[in-house]
Image: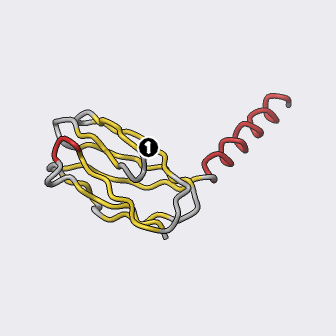
């Protein structure tokens, strides 16, 4: 019975941790972010799941979000941001700046 109660408490704590932030997905393919505009809720911590489907690495970078993360080709990364004030927060891929561009829109 103790194990069941402990398992329930751990499950509840995990659920609360995930309830604190919303999850959003970005894909890097052909040196571009998809979607290039991603709407997220203002005032909440959000979890960005970034999947690099290219064979080469790309760096998710944003001066406004104060984030830099290299994502090797064929892999995934998790990036937490926020809570954000309403507004536009551009990001780019440092290795392919001309094509790998996007913006988070907090509303």
Q: Hey, which quadrant is residue 56 in on the image?
A: top left
The answer to whether residue 44 is left or right of residue 93 is right
- Nearer-the-camera pick, 96 or 15: 96
Q: Position of residue 6 (x, y in %)?
A: 79, 32
Q: Nearer the viewer, residue 36 or 13?
A: 36
Say what secondary structure mark 1 lies in.
strand
Above or below: residue 6 compared with residue 83 = above
Task: Give the residue at mark 1.
Answer: 79
Q: Position of residue 77 (x, y in %)?
A: 38, 39
Q: Residue at x 56, y 53 (%)?
A: 45
State the image coordinates of residue 68 (x, y, percent, origin top left): 36, 40
- Asked whether, in this view, residue 99 is left or right of residue 76, the answer is left
Position in image of residue 23 (x %, y %): 49, 54
Identify the residue at image location x=46%, y=63%.
Answer: 40
Q: Is residue 91 left or right of residue 65?
A: left
Q: Is residue 78 above or below residue 64?
A: above
């Amino acid at each position: 019975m103790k194990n069941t109660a402990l398992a329930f408490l751990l499950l509840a704590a995990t659920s609360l941790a995930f309830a604190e932030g919303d999850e959003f997905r970005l894909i890097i393919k052909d040196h571009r972010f998809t979607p290039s505009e991603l709407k997220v809720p203002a005032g909440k911590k959000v979890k960005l799941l970034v999947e690099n489907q290219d064979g080469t690495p790309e760096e998710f970078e944003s001066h406004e979000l104060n984030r830099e993360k290299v994502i090797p080709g064929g892999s995934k990364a998790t990036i937490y941001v926020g809570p954000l004030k309403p507004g536009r927060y551009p990001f780019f891929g440092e290795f392919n700046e001309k094509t790998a561009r996007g913006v988070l829109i907090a509303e």
